[in-house]
Image (cartoon, helix red, strand yellow):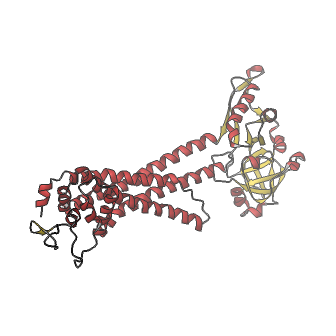
Amino acid sequence: MCPKEHGPKEVSGKLAPLRYWKASNIKPMATTSLSKPTSFDRTLASARSTMMFSEVVRLAVDSFRASKTRFLLTMLGMVIGSASIILVATLGSTGKQYALDELTSIGPNKVELQYGGGTVMGPDNTSTPDYMTLDDMNAVLEQVPGIIASSPMLEFHDNVSLGGGISKSTMLLGVSPQYRIVRNLIVVSGRFFDDQDARAHDKVAVIVKPFAEELYGTSNAAVGKIISVKGIPFVIIGVFRESINTFGESEISDHTMLVPYPVARYFTGTNTLKEIFFTMRDPSMVMPARDRILAIIRSRHYAGSVYSAVTLTELLSAMTKIADMLTVVLTLGAGITLIVSGVGIMNSMLANVQSRIKEIGIRKALGATSREIRLQFLTEAVFLSLSGGIIGTVIGLALPFTLGLLTPFKIPISPWSAVISLATSVVVGVLFGTLPANRAARLDPVQTLKYE
């Protein structure tokens, strides 16, 4: 039986919603003009059944469109916080890599054997330091595989004559030509003495750059000059510097002169060595070689003598731990920005709940559960937080990547920083969106419908 009227039916003085016509199979007149239903209208029409997550997302998008400026300003804090986390992590990784590269340039695979104490008792109760000898170094070279360079070091001090009655206090080190490889020295002018100079006992010397500049003004001017040690003239054939400035903490000072080891023995009259340097072929061989070298040296000397083997492995490990800890601390500091942003999201969502009390009441009256209301507002908070996190992550990754492309600097970018940034954004959205979502879910539908 057809209805008597085809116009919209009145329900309590108001037009019935479109859902009424669908439910009663009553079609409106063809001439009636109806606007396209929004996602909110479609959600209201299906509120008697469990909401699909896609409907929740559509409601969140509609909410953002209604308050673009407020949500964009709220999102700005998440953008800054997420970008800060990635940039701080990148700066920490870059600083760590720079520090490790600088330390490694001293000699990444170096093992420095040092005499620490102990004496040999002789006739008439005289004691003599139990120094190492050249034979000890040769024994190590024969028994420890993987050594690619080695050098003894004989140290003595003297006032060298520069001519014209001028003398300078100088530290002379008798080393082998391989000392340049072991210590990763850089020759800035001239050349380093070679095996031929050592075999011929040539009176040649290589001086450190600050000493050359102090004596002759420039490094180039020092090459070819004559310097006298205990009346014996030495020709300066080169000027060198350390790969990094050790600020006097190494065996090389600002007044150091290197001479071939066989020549240095003329001045000491002894075969004893205070230090021996070795370079291993691979960094993984450093620690096993250190233990083996110490065992060989101790077996060749008295039990009371003390020897130590210094490597950069422990120092590099300690530096890595310190740099990682600093990066974590700085990243946590940058994370405070996200917490502040979370408070802003919570305040914005609370205001959003307050402005949508009528909507919440209508949805509850049409059958929406508290769980669905809670899910809707929690999804909006997470979506807002995650959107800011994604934008901030893109900015945080783009800046160092662009800088690495446009400059010669090598900037390491950790993908974990992006993962942490996005995960933190989600966590912040959940934590600070829970309170507004719970408040919306607890609203009484009767009171909300009366709210003006």
Relative to residue 452, is residue 104 depicted above or below? above
Front position in the image: 306 or 3: 3
Question: Could one spot residue 445 in this view of the protein?
Answer: yes
Res. 429 image quadrant? bottom left
How many numbered discs sit on the rendered protein? 0
* Rendering coords of residue 15 (x, y %): 15, 69
Camera-nearest residue between 19 and 282: 19
Relative height, residue 418 to residue 152 (above, below)? below
Instruction: Check the picture and name the quadrant holding the N terminus.
Output: bottom left
Q: In the image, is 401 to the left or to the right of 440?
A: right
Q: Residue at x 43, y 60 (%)?
A: 390
Q: Nearer the viewer, residue 228 or 209?
A: 209
> Toward the viewer: 421 or 251?
421
Residue most toward the left? 13
In the image, is 379 to the left or to the right of 18?
right
What is the x, y in percent for residue 257? 75, 50
Residue situated furthest right in the rendering: 200
Residue 32: horizontal and vertical position, in percent? 22, 77
Q: Quadrant of the C terminus?
A: bottom left
Residue 129 visible in the shown view: no
